[in-house]
Structure formats: structure tokens, C-alpha cells
Image (cartoon, helix red, strand yellow):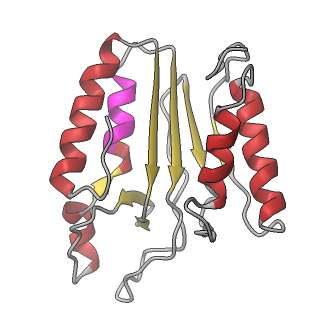
Amino acid sequence: IYRENASLREMNEAVRAFSKRIQSADVSAFFYAGHAVQVDGQNYLLPIDVDVAEEYEISYEAFPLDRMLASLEKSDTSLNMVFLDACRNNPYSFSRSATRGIAMTRAPSATLVSYATAPDDVAMDGTGRNSPYTKHLVDAIGRPGASLVDVIDLVQRGVRDETGGRQRPWVQYDVLPRDFVFVSE
């Protein structure tokens, strides 16, 4: 399920379709690149049509990350992967409780959540087509025989090296299966 520059309605529809599709899957992967904000410890993915004038409006104008994570909890998948390239400065000057970046969240069991940078920090956009995080993620996933553990390690090292240590990807997981690979040898 692919969406680009999605409205809030389109984000809701995509996550609903994703939730249905993973009910019969062994493995699921969710990737989001875009703006996100943290308000009162909750993470919200910002749709293209977000329109807020006051902080309280975020909760009904943006997509709560917890809603997508709840769909993973209801699935019977053996492995869920969530990749978030969404740690940006909060663009709303009115915000008193919002902080930099996005907050760590409670991930369901058998779920890896990979953040572009450490909690409450800001990820860099980079200079090319993709951010440093997405660039290294795409490269690592495409390596034949690279396990999920290898992919995470390659992404973390690549982003740290490229950004001179200013950005440190962060990972949250239960237990990672060492035998999972994206591309077989």
C-alpha cells in the first residue's frame, strides 16, 4: 500500500487497508517519511492537509502513531517492522507541551520500531532525494543475505558516519529474529 503526500483521510484509509492485509501475513512492514510532532508524549504523523491553529487541534487533525501500532497488536504476524523517518522540529510556535522530535512509544510484542534519530531529537533531511536515514535503510535492505539485525546495524553506522554523529538512529524491539532477511542470497 503506497501513499505519497496523503491527506488525513487517505492516511486513515491506508492504515485501515494495511490492518486488513496483515491479518493473513507472517511479516509486516510499515514505512513513514514525513513530518511528525510529539504533543503531550503522543506522536502524530502529519498529513499533507494538516490545518491547526491551536495545539489541541493536533489530536484530530493529525494521524496518531498509536493507532497504527494498535493494528499490529491485533494481527497474528510473527514479525512487525515500523520504520519512521519522521523526527522533525515542531513547526507550531503556539505549542507549549510539544517537544523536539518524536517520543518513544510502546511497541507491541514481535515489533521492531526503527526511528531516524534518538527520542526527542531532530533528524536531518539531507541533500539528496532521501534523508540520510532513508538512504541507508534502502541500501541496507537491498543487500542480499543481510539479516534484520545486520540492516539495523548498517543503518545506524551509516547515518552516524554521514552526519558526523549528530544523528543517531534509535531502535526499539522485543526480540529480533536473526534469520529474517529482506533479500535472499
Estimate the x, y position of residue 55 in percent, counting from the top left: 29, 77
The quadrant of the rendering that contains the C terminus is top right
Q: Position of residue 157 (x, y in %)?
A: 82, 49
Taking the spot 51% from the left edge, 14% from the top edge, the residue there is 78
Q: Is the stretch drawn in magenta largely helix, strand or loop?
A: helix
Specify the quadrant of the image occupied by residue 41. bottom left
What is the quadrant of residue 166 in the picture? Answer: bottom right
In the displayed structure, 111 sits above or below 44; it is above
Q: At 41% across and 83% down in the image, what residue appears? A: 96
- Residue 46: x and y in percent read 33, 63
Whether residue 71 is in magenta: the answer is yes
Residue 183 shown in magenta: no
19 on left or right of 33: left
Residue at point 61%, 59% (across, down): 119
Q: Quadrant of the N terminus?
A: top left
Is 77 rendered above or below residue 36? above
Residue at the extreme left of the image, as rendered: 9
Q: Nearer the viewer, residue 29 or 109?
A: 29
In depth, the one of 29 and 69 nearer the eye is 29
Compared across the picture, whether 153 is left or right of 27 comes to right
Q: Is residue 163 left or right of residue 106?
A: right
Residue 32 picture location, percent across and down? 44, 49
- Left or right: residue 172 compared with residue 22: right
Foreground of the two, 136 or 84: 136
**Quarter of the image holding residue 151?**
top right
- Residue that protrudes farthest toward the bottom in the picture: 93
Q: What residue span does the magenta drawing correspond to? A: 67-74
